[in-house]
Image: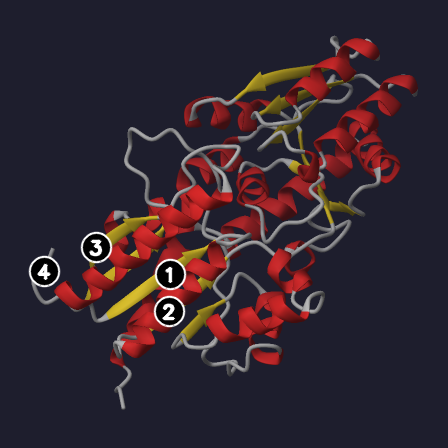
């Protein structure tokens, strides 16, 4: 690390190696801790990772947030960073990071907000109090980094940022390991029992119950497939009971959480990736599947339509619609040629737009722009 490297303070998902947590925020944080970014900046980290799933009670979470806010103020005053990076997920995370951005503004330290997910965009107009809170907390940053065009429109139209101060920086989770899987994938002859993969939390809002209903419909129509669910969560017991009740044990496997190496193995050995969430930003799991050259079925939510064209890069379906989800899966299970075409184009998109190398470089360049700007 060069002594002259600009000093940054980053707040987000930066858990210690001993903490076994998962999610897109972790993947993003890992890249910020990586060699390329740390070669350009001297970064100190504050970890704001959710400690457990389900999350602790609201009062406990509020206590953790208050302690982090105190630590943030101390870090800014004691170490005088030249800028702060604030990564926020959905839920109350934006309140905490918005308070930090406001503090940085008062301390005359440039701040960068990078919000993930998409719920905030859709919730903005629903409640007047929430709308006021969002505008009060999220308008003091020097830059508002956006996952995609939908976030940029929100930043410009609702929060008053300029296009220049709200650059689009797509997720950078198409790692070289995953792209290598995609490059080395050998198309499988048809007919083969189609292998379908889901990776993520087993939560109702992830559309996981819709997926099992779709699997039942597919079995009833006589289709041959194997669905593997990697992950865990509140819906697991419901899923296990549904599998037993509808005799789906020969079609559905609940594998629990797997190591990163095991997940890469699943990505390499499956044909179709499915993500039927009710709401997302730009899901990292989807990008990882595209990088591994899987044909994808995904809900038409969040930033997904900003980047993926239905029928070109993936099959996009309405959320909360098991019938439409089942029809899309049926098309790909039966049509190997379409699977290969969608997978090829998804792989190209992942390599061109979502690669880790390009994304981290783009991100670091934009951070440098902020640090070079003169302060009033």
x then y, percent, for residue 225: 76, 19
* Residue at figure coordinates x 55%, y 40% from the top left: 285
Residue 346 relative to residue 363: left or right: right
The residue where tag 4 is placed is 2
Work out how far the residue at label 4 is from the one at label 2, CA to CA, in angstroms: 27 Å
* Residue at figure coordinates x 55%, y 77% from the top left: 159
Q: Are marks 3 and 4 in contact (CB under 8 Å)?
A: no
Q: Are marks 4 and 1 in contact (CB under 8 Å)?
A: no
Tell me the crowding category of disc 2: few under 14, some 14 to 19, or many 20 or more residues within 10 angstroms, Cα based.
many
* Residue at figure coordinates x 70%, y 15% from the top left: 240
The residue where tag 3 is placed is 44
Work out how far the residue at label 3 is from the one at label 2, CA to CA, in angstroms: 16 Å
Q: Is residue 68 visible?
A: yes
Lower sequence index among marks 3 and 2: 3
State the residue in front, 56 or 262: 56
Q: Residue furthest right?
A: 221
Work out how far the residue at label 1 is from the one at label 3, CA to CA, in angstroms: 12 Å
Residue 219 relative to residue 34: left or right: right
Q: Are marks 2 and 1 in contact (CB under 8 Å)?
A: yes
Lower sequence index among marks 2 and 1: 1
Above or below residue 154? Residue 290 is above
Q: Quadrant of the C terminus?
A: bottom left
The residue where tag 2 is placed is 101
Work out how far the residue at label 2 is from the one at label 1, CA to CA, in angstroms: 8 Å
The residue where tag 1 is placed is 86
Secondary structure at numbered mark 2: helix
Tell me the crowding category of disc 4: few under 14, some 14 to 19, or many 20 or more residues within 10 angstroms, Cα based.
few
Q: Residue furthest front?
A: 59
Query: Of the numbered discs in the image, which one, if any, rests on residue 40?
Result: none
Lower sequence index among marks 3 and 4: 4
Q: Is residue 138 visible?
A: no
């Amino acid at each position: 690390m060069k002594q002259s490297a600009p000093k940054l303070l980053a707040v987000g998902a930066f858990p210690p190696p001993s903490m076994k947590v998962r999610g897109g925020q972790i993947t993003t944080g890992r890249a910020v801790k990586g060699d390329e970014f740390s070669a350009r900046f001297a970064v100190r980290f504050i970890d704001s990772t959710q400690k457990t799933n389900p999350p602790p009670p609201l009062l406990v979470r509020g206590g953790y947030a208050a302690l982090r806010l105190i630590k943030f103020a101390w870090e800014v005053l004691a170490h005088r960073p030249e800028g702060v990076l604030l990564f926020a997920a959905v839920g109350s995370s934006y309140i905490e990071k918005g308070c930090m951005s406001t503090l940085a503004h008062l301390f005359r330290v440039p701040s960068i907000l990078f919000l993930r997910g998409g719920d905030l965009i859709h919730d903005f107009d629903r409640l007047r109090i929430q709308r006021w809170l969002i505008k009060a907390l999220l308008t003091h940053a020097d830059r508002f980094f956006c996952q995609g065009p939908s976030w940029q429109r929100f930043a410009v139209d609702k929060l008053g940022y300029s296009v220049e101060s709200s650059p689009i920086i797509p997720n950078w989770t198409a790692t070289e390991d995953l792209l290598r899987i995609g490059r080395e994938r050998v198309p499988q002859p048809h007919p083969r029992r189609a292998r379908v993969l889901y990776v993520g939390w087993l939560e109702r809002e992830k559309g996981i119950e819709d997926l099992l209903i779709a699997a039942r419909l597919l079995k009833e129509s006589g289709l041959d497939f194997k669905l593997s669910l990697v992950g865990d969560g509140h819906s697991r017991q419901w899923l296990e009971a549904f599998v037993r009740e509808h005799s789906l044990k020969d079609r559905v496997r609940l594998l629990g959480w797997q190591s990163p190496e095991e997940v890469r193995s699943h990505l390499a050995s499956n044909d179709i990736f499915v993500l039927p969430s009710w709401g997302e930003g730009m899901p990292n799991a989807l990008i990882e599947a595209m990088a591994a050259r899987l044909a994808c079925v995904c809900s038409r939510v969040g930033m997904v339509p900003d980047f993926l064209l239905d029928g070109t890069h993936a099959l996009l379906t309405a959320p909360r619609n098991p019938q439409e989800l089942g029809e899309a899966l049926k098309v790909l299970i039966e049509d190997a040629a379409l699977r290969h075409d969608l997978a090829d184009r998804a792989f190209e998109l992942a390599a061109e737009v979502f690669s880790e190398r390009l994304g981290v470089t783009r991100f670091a360049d934009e951070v440098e722009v902020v640090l070079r700007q003169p302060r009033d």
